[in-house]
Amino acid sequence: MARRAIPGQGAFDLVELRPEVPDLASYDVILMNVSGGKDSQAALSELVLHATAAGVMDRIVVVHADLGMVEWPGVRELAAEHAAHYGLRFEVVRREGSSLVERVEERGMWPSADNRWCTSDFKRGPIRKLITRLVRELRAAGHTGPVRVLNVMGLRADESAARRKLPPFAHDGSRTCPCPECQRRRKATEAAKAAGITTKKIPAKDKMQHGASNTLRWVDTWLPIHSWSAADVWTAIFAAGTRPHPAYAAGMPRLSCVFCILASRAALVRAAQLQPALAARYLLAEQLAGHRFRLDVSMAEIVAEAAAAPAPPAGTLVACWEG
């Protein structure tokens, strides 16, 4: 059993958890996405371990996508605390304009498992703007050629069937990326469409991607804890000595939006008990939009169940969910 240690922290045991680590020294920017939740917290500690060994700690930028009123109180401050624990640069991004709840009222519909516009609009989009800014910083400082960016996230295979299918390491290709593989996909997609084949029927290996790479930047994505279990995550957090969000101690199994569209019914009820004012705001949005929070459950039902159900005993985790 290998002993692993982060400078200034205790060594701990984790067996065969890591996928092959990319060559961190080959990247100009290493962007670590942190939500304040346990998985990004553990992924950050894992990244620091390898970045320290590679001598590239100065290339790490920690980013938090601020979701405003729909996320748990204190997550922005906690994300900053996690970055400061390692002495890393910390950036906050946020979508301009309406909040997520206001967007629901404007669109007349909630996000869904098949249409997660919440992620694209409130996380991925603002983070790509930060990538653009970081690339400009380097080019202004004299960098020539495409800027190599490694986008690091704490996604785990255990979280859902969709995440189990994700490769731990992948190129974030796009139509405008000049690499041979992206250009092959572009031509294959264009040929398929010219032949009358719909986008959904184009094989995944040939389908054009819509990632963050372009002529000015090469972006890859790395999931350093993709194969880890929840127990592995907590082991890493304990060894790192960083503080977890108190929502876990209150019974929440995950820390996404307070009322994640993919959450289990039990988690939604517990969240409504912990954040009743926000639950009431979601209920109002449901009424104004004229659209149920989810096909199988409405916010009206969640609010009613939260009021009627007793709070679970201390230390009790409610049912988790996939997504």
Image (cartoon, helix red, strand yellow):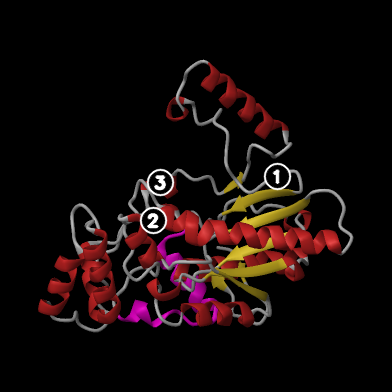
Q: Are the two marked residues, 1 and 2, in contact with CB atoms closer than 8 angstroms?
A: no
Q: Main secondary structure of the magenta part?
A: helix
Inter-mark Cα distance, 1 to 3:
26 Å
Q: Which mark is residue 159?
A: 2
| Within-10-Å neighbours for mark 1: few <14, some 14–19, many 20+ | some
Question: Could you tell me the amino acid type at mark 3?
Answer: Ala
* One can see residue 15 in this view: no
Mark 1 or 3, closer to the camera: 1
Q: Is residue 75 left or right of residue 277?
A: right
Between discs 1 and 2, the one toward the N terminus? 2
Determine the residue positioned at 38% across, 82% down. 246
Residue beneath disc 1: 214
Q: Which quadrant of the rendered structure holds the N terminus? A: bottom right
Residue beneath disc 3: 162
Q: Quadrant of residue 286?
A: bottom left
Q: Which residue is nearer to you in this view: 34 or 293?
A: 293
Expressed as whole percent of the image width and height from the top left, the position of residue 12 reads 55, 72
Q: Which residues are magenta?
A: 228-250
Determine the residue positioned at 47% across, 29% down. 199
Mark 1 or 2, closer to the camera: 1
Residue lying furthest right:
142
* One can see residue 64 in this view: yes
Expressed as whole percent of the image width and height from the top left, the position of residue 126 reads 57, 61
Q: Which mark is residue 114?
A: none
Membership of 49 in magenta stretch? no
Question: Could you tell me the amino acid type at mark 2?
Answer: Glu
| Within-10-Å neighbours for mark 2: few <14, some 14–19, many 20+ | some
Q: Is residue 280 left or right of residue 208?
A: left
Residue lying furthest left:
308
Expressed as whole percent of the image width and height from the top left, the position of residue 174 reads 63, 40
For mark 1, give the secondary structure: loop
Q: Is residue 74 left or right of residue 32?
A: left
